[in-house]
Amino acid sequence: MKKILFIVGSLRKESFNRQLAQEAEKYLAGNADVAYLDYTDVPFINQDIEYPAPAAVAQLRETVSQTDGIWIFTPEYNFSYPGHLKNLLDWLSRPVVAYDFATPTVINGKKVALSGAGGQMATGKCREKLVELLTFIKADVMTEPQTGVILNTEAWTEGCMILTDEQRAALKAQAEAFVKFLQ
């Protein structure tokens, strides 16, 4: 069975994107093993501490290297991705062996899917910029389908995301497509 690592781009415990990931996990049951990445202890990237890699970064790289694919669920911050998600991807894009730029990084060739829940843009700008970034760092991005969810007013006021049947169908279709993409 394929191993999929979920990366939630919001650090908030009950974030809408964590809720979206939990919904997507249901559609992968029986077709993939899912794990969630906890990257709260990954330091800001800094060449002064890059080699040897901090323990949290070494563990991050090990976790990513053992997965078949990554599914990122992220909000949109000011028409882009959250800074802590960018920091995580920066660490994954760096050589594992000091200054060995010829050896592939752990993100190189890794299959990635993108989804997001947010405001009226349904995280479209964020996902667009993530495709650009992930392609640049040599990840293999599944550009279609993607799932973008516009949160309703109740989500913002009550903190609970309620998906429409259409949004659930889109997420299910993306889950099925990602499993095929991993083969």
Image (cartoon, grey):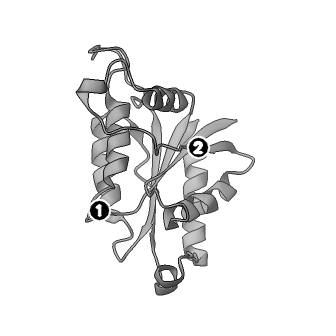
Q: Residue shown at 62%/62% (left/top)? A: 23
Looking at the rendered structure, the kind of residue marked 2 is Lys
**Amino acid on which disc 1 is placed:** Lys
Q: Identify whether 119 is placed above or below 70.
A: below
Q: Is residue 174 visible?
A: yes
User: In the image, is residue 132 above or below residue 110?
Assistant: below
Residue 141: quarter of image: top left
Mark 2, residue position? 180
Query: Is residue 101 rendered to the left or right of residue 65?
Result: left
Q: Residue 125, labelled with which disc? A: 1
- Looking at marks 1 and 2 on the same chain, the residue that comes earlier in the sequence is marked by 1
* Residue 138 visible somewhere in the drawing: no
- Where is the N terminus found, in terms of image quarters? top right
Furthest residue toward right:
30
Residue at left 31%, top 39%?
44
Classify residue 3 by image quadrant: top right
Answer above or below: position of 18 versus 111.
below
Foreground of the two, 37 or 178: 37
32 vs 58: above or below: below
Q: Nearer the viewer, mark 1 or mark 2?
A: 1
Task: Give how far across and how far down residue 131 sits, in percent.
Answer: 33, 48
Locate residue 55, reporting x and y percent: 46, 26
Is residue 3 or residue 155 the one in the foreground?
155
Residue in the picture at 46% in, 56% down: 11
